[in-house]
Amino acid sequence: MNLKQIVMRAAILAACTVGPATLSAHAQGMGGGMGQMTPEQRSARQLDMMKTRLNLSEDQTAKVKDFMAERDKKMADLRSSGGDMETMRPKMMEIQKDYSDKVKGILTDDQKKTYEEMQSQMRGGGRPGPPPQQ
């Protein structure tokens, strides 16, 4: 084997070793986005967004925060129960619906309209899910 072949093999080996490690590091922490956030961080971000977009009062903000904490606990309990996703999905949807109903219950009519628009955007702009069951 000549020097040129040795250098080429070393370069290929280095690329195969360093490339995946770099991608893994990027995916685990430097990529940003909601996927790397803890449930508490996601709820805090969601609360900040709702407070701003809905112009929530301090009382409304406190109530929404309580509703989120209750929702997050129920979701965590459900996930830790060890069930499969198909079994948990309807329960998760019910928890989310209950949360949403509670939020709507403390909003003004104008805030409800904005909240519904936000919900619609989240459903339309999020990752595609399974088709609706009939």
Image (cartoon, rainbow, N blue to C red):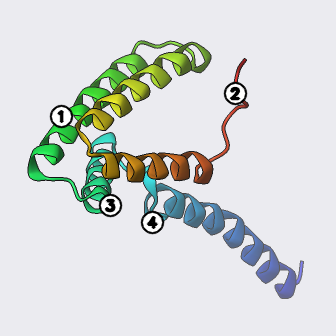
In the displayed structure image, the side of residue 60 where residue 19 appears, left or right: right
Residue 42: x percent and y percent?
A: 34, 48
Mark 3, residue position: 53
Q: Is residue 120 visible?
A: yes
Q: Along the polypeptide, which appears first: circle 3 or circle 4?
A: 4
Mark 4, residue position: 30
Towards the viewer: 95 or 32: 95
* CB atoms of marks 2 and 3 within 8 Å: no
Q: Secondary structure at mark 2?
A: loop
Mark pair 2, 4: CA separation? 34 Å
Which numbered mark, 1 or 3, is in the foreground of this view? Answer: 3
Please, what is the three-letter code of the amino acid marked with disc 4? Met
In the displayed structure image, the side of residue 55 where residue 88 appears, left or right: right
Q: Secondary structure at mark 3?
A: helix
Mark 2, residue position: 132
Residue in the picture at 44% in, 53% down: 34
Mark 1, residue position: 66
Please, what is the three-letter code of the amino acid marked with disc 2? Pro
Mark pair 2, 3: CA separation? 29 Å
Q: Is residue 35 visible?
A: no
In this view, 2 is above or below 96 = below
Which numbered mark, 2 or 4, is in the foreground of this view? Answer: 2
Q: Along the polypeptide, which appears first: circle 2 or circle 1?
A: 1
Q: Along the polypeptide, which appears first: circle 1 or circle 4?
A: 4
Residue 130: x percent and y percent?
A: 70, 32
Q: How many other residues sit within 10 Å of disc 4, few (<14), some (14-19) or many (≥20)? A: few
